[in-house]
């Protein structure tokens, strides 16, 4: 088993968020011509929710491309700048969840209503 340091983990999280948004954009572009009218005027807002074990021993990086994810991680939430297939500098809200993580079993319990409340507070919905 290969262990990763936390710098690599946070970089991977940011890259996965960017990749997921790009894939979503790509999937929307594959709609049939009939479906295209349905999506006219559609606005998409991305929110990233990251569930983790609560480990806090992350230091900043010397790579300026990842400074933003470190700041968001330290505050357990905030605005992340992402570069995606269609957007450069897309700003999305991110929330890190670690409450309820069981270090013995490696599982986490969280109520969907707690997630919903966090999302509403992040976006001001």
Image (tube, helix red, strand yellow):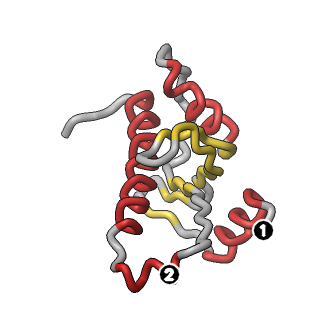
- Against 101, residue 19 (above or below) is above
On the image, the x and y values in percent for residue 105 come to 40, 61
Q: Quadrant of residue 49?
A: bottom right
Q: Which residue is mark 2?
A: 37
Left or right: 63 in relation to 73: left
- Against 107, residue 88 (above or below) is above
- Against 111, residue 92 (above or below) is above
Q: Residue at x 45, y 55 (%)?
A: 21
State the SS at label 1: loop
Residue sitting nearer the eye, 62 or 54: 62
Q: Earlier in the sequence, mark 1 or mark 2?
A: 2
On the image, the x and y values in percent for residue 54 come to 55, 45
Q: Which residue is mark 1?
A: 125
On the image, the x and y values in percent for residue 3 come to 28, 34
Q: Quadrant of residue 36?
A: bottom left
Q: Residue at x 74, y 57 (%)?
A: 122
Q: Residues within 10 Å of mark 1 (few under 14, many from 20)?
A: few
Q: Is residue 86 visible?
A: yes
Left or right: 72 in relation to 3: right
Q: Quadrant of the C terminus?
A: bottom right
Q: Quadrant of the N terminus?
A: top left
Residue 35's disc is none
């Amino acid at each position: 088993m290969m262990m990763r340091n936390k710098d690599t983990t946070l970089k991977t999280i940011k890259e996965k968020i960017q990749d997921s948004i790009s894939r979503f954009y790509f999937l929307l572009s594959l709609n049939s011509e009939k479906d295209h009218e349905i999506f006219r005027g559609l606005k998409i807002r991305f929110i990233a929710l990251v569930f983790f074990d609560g480990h806090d021993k992350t230091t900043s990086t010397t790579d300026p491309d990842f400074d933003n994810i470190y700041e968001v991680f330290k505050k357990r939430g905030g605005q992340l700048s992402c570069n995606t297939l269609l957007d450069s500098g897309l700003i999305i809200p991110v929330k890190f969840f670690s409450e309820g993580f069981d270090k013995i079993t490696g599982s986490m319990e969280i109520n969907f209503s707690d997630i919903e409340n966090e999302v509403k507070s992040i976006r001001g919905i």
